[in-house]
Image (cartoon, coloured by chain):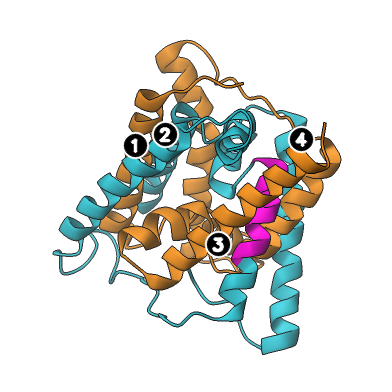
Amino acid sequence: MRLVFAFAFGLLFGSGILISGMGNPAKVLNFFDFAGTWDPSLAFVMGGALLVTAIGYRLVFRMRKPLLAQAFSLPTRQDLDIRLLGGSAIFGIGWGLSGFCPGGLIPVLGLGMSGPLLTAAAIAAGIVSARWMIKLNYGGQPAGA
Amino acid sequence: MTDFTPLLSFAGGAMIGLAVVALMAVHGRIAGINGIVSGFLTTRLSQDWAWRGAFLAGLIASPLIMLGVSGQLPAITIPSSPVLLAIGGFLTGVGTTLGSGCTSGHGVCGMSRLSTRSITATLTFMATAVVTVFLTRHVFGG
């Protein structure tokens, strides 16, 4: 049952990505291009997602526990560190080069185009490399979001 | 040029938000796509691995839903060359892993919870993306 729900939520998330334009790199890159062909659409994606999530999360957190799990898994860290800032800065550079963030990319993989598959392979390589860097430097596991 | 699509984009964003809220209500989990992908890329199979796989399968199958409802597949235009896609993808994987989140994890889930870390991360990656596009399109590009 948990898996059926997870699949359905993936479908909903992915459909939202495709309808909103987050899966279209031309649109994403134009959102960042203030000095050129600026397309403000993605601000509306963020607005819609934040509005629903901010209200929905508040309602959900009134429940004692999730419907099909023992507890809510939430990050607790509040400190800012160089890894958060440096990592996010690097991600933004990558996003600006390709036009694909992870959430925009995965639904597009279903279309079978070569560019998204190449990007996904590169992201996987980046994830594995970063885990290795973290292990060398910190000797621990990557912290959750 | 791409068309300005405020209504479709807002509706799509609201659907993303619904999925994010539903995953928390049912599974108790943050819908950070990079975190879900990263947790799926492991050799240790577990219950967590299974729901992540099911969620990712739903994401990949979502164009079929769109095809069924609207009769057409989404228009995807990729301006970047394969070399830029590879470099950009690699930096995205490295950056989101070091920074513990991407647009969905920090930008939607974390900012909705008013997490200082997520707000800082989102402002940071948005800023470097804007600078990167400015440099590639208006300084070095044609």
Chain cyan in the figure, letter: A
Q: Nearer the viewer, residue A121 or B114?
A: B114
Distance from the alpha carbon under mark 2 to that under mark 4: 23 Å
Look at label 4 and name its amino acid: Ser
Residue at the bottom extreme, as displayed: A139
Point 46% across, 58% down: residue: B105
Q: Contact (CB < 8 A) between labels 1 and 2?
A: yes
Query: Along the line of sight, which residue is nearer the eye, A24 or A42?
Result: A42
x, y (%) of residue A76?
37, 79
Q: Which residue is mark 3?
A: B124
Q: Is residue B39 left or right of residue B137?
A: left
Among numbered discs 1 and 4, the one appearing first in the sequence: 1
The residue that disc 4 covers is B80
Upstream in sequence: badge 4 or badge 3: 4
Residue on which disc 2 sits: A16
Q: Dot 4, how many residues are within 10 Å of its Cα: few (below 14), some (14-19), or many (20+)?
A: some
Label 4 resides on the chain identified as: B
Question: Up-down: is B71 above or below A116?
Answer: above
Cβ atoms at labels 1 and 3 below 8 Å apart:
no
Give the chain coloured orange.
Answer: B
- How packed is label 2: few (under 14 Cα within 10 Å), some, or many (20 or more)? many
